[in-house]
Structure formats: structure tokens, C-alpha cells
Amino acid sequence: MIIDVIKIFIPTATAFFIGIAITPFVSHYLYKHKMWKKKSGNLVGLGGGGTPIFNELHKERDTGTPRMGGIIIWASVLATIFFFWLLAQVSSSEFWKEMDFLSRGQTWLPLFTLIAASLVGLVDDLFQIKGKGDYLAGGLSLKVRISLVVLIALIGAWWFFVKLGVSGIMVPFYGELELGLLFIPLFVITMVALFSGGVIDGIDGLSGGVMTSIFSAYALIAFFQNQIDLAVFSAVIAGGTLAFLWFNIPPARFYMTETGILGLTATLTVVAFLTKAVVVLPIIALPLLIAPTSSLIQVLSKRFRHGKKVFLVAPIHHHFEALGWPSYKVTMRFWIISIIFAMIGVVIALIG
């Protein structure tokens, strides 16, 4: 028990300090090469119209602050995994061998997902910076991004179904629900839904704090399921995200953007299914559900209510900004909501 706790805490702290250590180098590169959007705001909204309120709110933020800060997260996670794997290979100590958390059954798939999805996000960020790709706003088109996410999801679903022999989920207070082949479309839909939750990455510090609480919650669930390697992996992601957050709190030194949020949301899907706690995912990751849902409500309202809006601007966190809330107040209140509902989700997952 004690060694398992140590196995979680030491790599988590290591990921944090590695993230802090590499940030000056990453930050220097991003600023030196002006890795930010050359024009502020969004040129097109989700519903196909303009976004004047959003553009006014963010006219001074989008230019001059680099994108691609999410590199800090996955780079620190990869470095931590490699560091402890290497120690286990070269050391004769049983302690360091025990600290290695790279395993086929628990961490290969989420690690692959983190790398693959983060690289897709990195390409999208580079296109946005250069103004290439989507002719309206730069970056990969939404269809291309969704197609790539679906491809990653299909690979993940195949691995679960064929390699790991997983085809069911746990339903709290009911037990395991066998899905058979329906497991595959459920996995894909979940990853695409979480991908849409990436719109939470819109205010300094918001996505970093939210994702930290979510991955910490799943680390706790995995720990009590005795999936120790998965618990360590989830906690290490939380540690790397905290390192990013250290520099992303207002005023942000850089933004997470697609290379960070896409990798995190895709990996979260895998972690949720590995713990069979996907049913409580909407509770633990409530902010990732609220944000895209508010955008969808806004689009439907404008389409079927003759242009009338429910929110001043969507997603909902920008609505509160438009009401006059300081961005830090919006961020901190979303952090509080995220922590509270993450705890509720963990309790339901463990006692259900």
C-alpha cells in the first residue's frame, strides 16, 4: 500500500518539476519564433456567423501570446515515463524496478493516444499560426480534426475489444453492463464528445485547472481498483498539467491550445474506459460537458428562434466574461465546480 502511494507521488512530482524545468526553453522558442495567431479573435463561429463579442473580449489576448503551451504537458509526461523506465532497466534495485509504470495492459494505450492526439493538435496549431488550412480561421478544418479523432478512437476501441478483451462498462449501483460490439461505437462517440469539450480552453488557467482535477479523480479511481500503473499515469498527467498551469494563470505566458487539449481529452476517454468508470465521466468532467452544450444551445436557438441568443456569447464561460466578470473569477469558479463534481463522481464510482 505504502509503496503504491509512493509510486504515484514521486512520478507526479517529477512530471511537475520536469515541466517547470523545460518551460523556459519552450517559452523562449515560442516567443523567438512568434508562435501566435497573427490576427486576433475568431473569424467564424460554430453556427457559421461572426463572433463580434468574443473578438472584442479577446482582441488583446490572441496576438502576442504564443500557442502550443500544451507541449509542456505531454513532454513532461513522456520524459517522466522514459526516466522511470530507464531507471528500471539500468538499476538493480527492486525499488526503481517497482517505480516503472509503463505496462502493456494499463499504460500503452493511453500513452499512444496522448502522443497521437497531441501531434494532431500540434499540426493544427502550426497551421493556425501560419494561417494555413481552413480558409476562414487557419488550422485543420473541423471535418479533418473530427476524422482524425475518430481514427484514433477506432484504434483505441479495437485495442480494448481485441487485445484487452474489454467489451463492457460498470454502471453504478447495477454492475457490469456487457455491450458486445456496441462497445466500439460508444467508445468513438465518447472520444468525439470529449473532443468537443476542448472549447473549455478559452480563458487563462481555465482548462489547466479543470483537466488537473479530472485526471486526479481518475487517478484515485484507478488506485482503488488496484490499477496502480494507470493511477500513476493519470497522476503524472495531472502533475504535468500543473506545471503548465503555473505559467498559464493570468496573465498567461502561453496558451494550451489544440496540442494540449486534444491530447488530454482523447487520453481521458481511454482512462475512463480502462477504469470502466465512463458512466460517471459526465459528472467528473462536468465542465467539459457544459461548455460544448452551451454552444450547441446557442446555435440551435439562433437557428430556430430567428437569431435570438440564449447567451451573450458561447461557450458559457465567455458569457460570464461578457457579463463583466473578470476572467480570473470565471476561471476560479469553474475550478471549484470541477473539483466538487470530480469528488462526487469518484464517490459514486467507488461505492456504486
Image (tube, grey):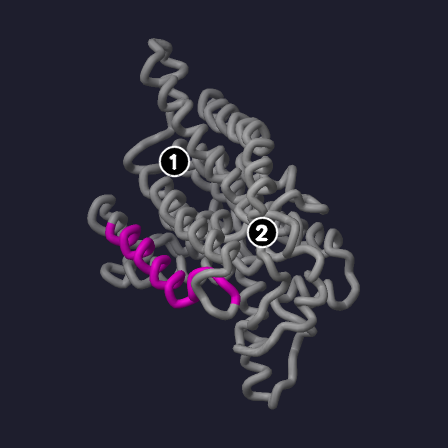
User: Residue 328 in the image: x percent, y percent?
Assistant: 74, 51
Q: Which residue is mark 1?
A: 227
Chain part drawn in magenta: 137-158
The single residue placed furthest to the left in the displayed view is 162
Q: How many numbered dots are placed on residues in this image? A: 2
- The main secondary structure of the magenta stretch is helix
Q: Are marks 1 and 2 in contact (CB under 8 Å)?
A: no
Query: For residue 119: magenta?
Result: no
The single residue placed furthest to the bottom in the displayed view is 306
**Which residue sits at x=33%, y=9%?**
92
The reply, left or right, for residue 268 in relation to residue 29 is left
- In-front residue for pair 92/75: 75
Under mark 2, the amino acid is Trp
Identify the element where label 2 is drawn. Answer: loop
Identify the element where label 1 is drawn. Answer: loop
- Within 10 Å of the Cα at label 1, are there few (<14), some (14-19), or many (20+) other Cα atoms? some
Q: Which residue is mark 2?
A: 36
Image height check: is 307 above or below 115? Answer: below
**Which residue sits at x=43%, y=57%?**
279
Which is more foreground, mark 1 or mark 2? 2
